Image: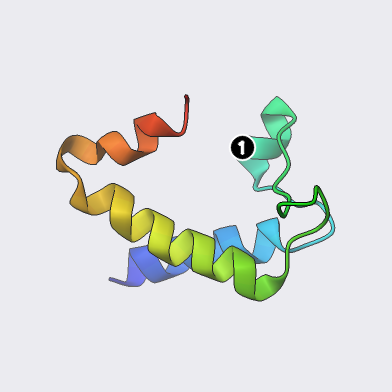
């Protein structure tokens, strides 16, 4: 539980910062945006991370993460 909370806190803090990316995303040149291409709000990033991770984790074999590739 603590690892999950720490992971979400890290992602939310980094993606809602001026960098708009975690260290891994920065390494490959990816940024997180809102639907208009702007900087996402803290609430939007928090919702995306909590709901998105929950849905990806309940699908067998974490296949929800693989769907992000397409």
Q: As rendered, which of 3 and 63 lies closer to the eye?
A: 63
Q: What is the quadrant of residue 24 in the picture?
A: top right
Name the residue at 20% across, 53% down.
58
Category of crowding for the residue at label 1, using alpha-carbon neighbours closer than 10 angstroms: few (below 14), some (14–19), many (at least 20): few
Name the residue at 65% across, 66% down.
13
39 sits to left or right of 32: right
Q: What is the quadrant of residue 51 in the picture?
A: bottom left
Q: What is the quadrant of residue 1 in the picture?
A: bottom left
Name the residue at 18% across, 36% down.
61
Q: Position of residue 67 (x, y in %)?
A: 38, 32
Q: How is the image coloured?
A: rainbow
Q: Position of residue 7 (x, y in %)?
A: 46, 60
Residue at mark 1: 24
Tag 1, which secondary structure? helix
Q: Eyeballing the image, is 58 above or below 5?
A: above
Extreme front residue here? 36
Q: Position of residue 66 (x, y in %)?
A: 36, 30
Q: Position of residue 45 (x, y in %)?
A: 61, 64
Name the residue at 65% across, 37% down.
25
Q: As rendered, which of 26 and 54 lies closer to the eye?
A: 54
45 sits to left or right of 69: right
Extreme left residue here? 60
């Amino acid at each position: 539980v603590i690892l999950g909370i720490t992971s979400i806190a890290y992602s939310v803090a980094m993606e809602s910062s001026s960098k708009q990316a975690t260290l891994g995303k920065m390494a490959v040149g990816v940024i997180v945006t809102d639907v208009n291409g702007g900087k996402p709000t803290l609430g939007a990033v928090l919702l995306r991370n909590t709901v998105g991770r929950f849905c990806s984790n309940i699908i067998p074999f974490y296949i929800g993460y693989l769907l992000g590739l397409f």
